Amino acid sequence: MIALPKGRLADQTLQLFAAAGLSLPAANKDRKLILASSRGDIRYVMSKPADVPTYVEYGAADLGICGLDTLRESRRHVYEPLLLPFGYCRLCLAAPVNRPDTPLRYASQPRVATKYPNLTADFFRARGVNAEIIALNGSVELGPLVGLADLIVDLVETGSTLQANGLVETRTIMQIQAVLIANRAAYHLKRTAVESVIGRLRSHLAQGQ
Ligand code: PRP
């Protein structure tokens, strides 16, 4: 079983699998969540990206694709056999453009809105800053605009969302890209099946270099 992410990473994941000669999920007209591949040799589970590390750590899926942001935030213990060449962006600290001071200079407790409460807490803790983390599920850039937060920690790809909302990037916390993850037990116990998928992806990617 392979956990594939719905949403942003979905198209490039499917393109990569097809290009590597792996058989893709058959067409899905009835919203099934578990899909057999067209050749019937692989089963796929279509998942919310944030759930992919959970499926893989528990062995519900042997392999999965997600972003490094999602993986690190999840704190799940999995193998990471292959970084994938898409989903590039960065996790950043950003502040209102008219008040770009970093919290590192704030005397008082900054309020920080984010979809990444664990990574954000780690970042501030490592710098001895006592931040109040406000966990949101999306549109984090709204935080400072509506007076909910002083700062945000969020993904930046082109920077246009920050710019459109009067925010400026003040720190890069982490470089992000997509990653293939593997269940630790399956990696050894189902080595032939797991390695055949990893091997196909790896040799396809090596050809492109
Ligand atoms: C992501 C991210 C930023 C935006 C960054 O949001 O959280 O909001 O994309 O991209 P940019 O730098 O190219 O403007 P997404 O579209 O996934 O929606 P969300 O904020 O609702 O999670």
Image (tube, grey):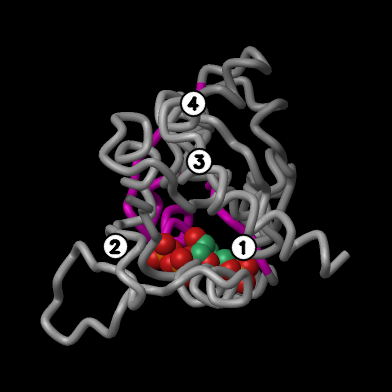
Query: What is the secondary structure assignment of the residue under circle 3?
Result: helix
Determine which quarter of the picture holds residue 142: bottom left
Question: In the displayed structure, would residue 74 be above or below residue 14?
Answer: above
Asked if residue 175 can be seen in this view, the reply is yes
Q: CA distance from mark 4 to mark 2?
A: 24 Å
| SS at circle 4 | helix
In the image, 20 versus 108, the foreground residue is 20
**Highlighted range, magenta:** 131-157
How far from the left and from the top, in percent, is residue 57?
36, 30
> Which label's residue is closer to the chain start, 4 or 2?
2
Q: Between tags 1 and 4, which lies in front?
A: 4
When asked about the image quadrant of residue 128, the answer is top right
Crowd tier of the residue under label 4, counting other residues whose Cα lies within 10 Å: few below 14, some 14–19, many 20 or above: few
Q: Amino acid at mark 2?
A: Met
Taking 103 as reference, is 150 left or right? left
Q: Decide if residue 97 is in sight here.
A: no
Disc 1 versus disc 4: distance between alpha carbons?
28 Å
What is the C-alpha distance between the residues marked 1 and 3?
Answer: 28 Å
- Say above or below: 66 vs 130: below
Determine whether label 4 and label 2 are within 8 Å by CB. Answer: no
Of badges 4 and 2, the one in the foreground is 4
Mark 1, residue position: 87
Instruction: Identify which residue is drawn at 50% across, 67% down.
Output: 9
Which residue is tagged 3?
A: 192
At label 3, which amino acid type do we have? Thr
Residue identified by numbered label 4: 188
For label 2, the residue is 46
Element type at mark 2: strand
The one nearer the camera, 167 or 63, is: 63
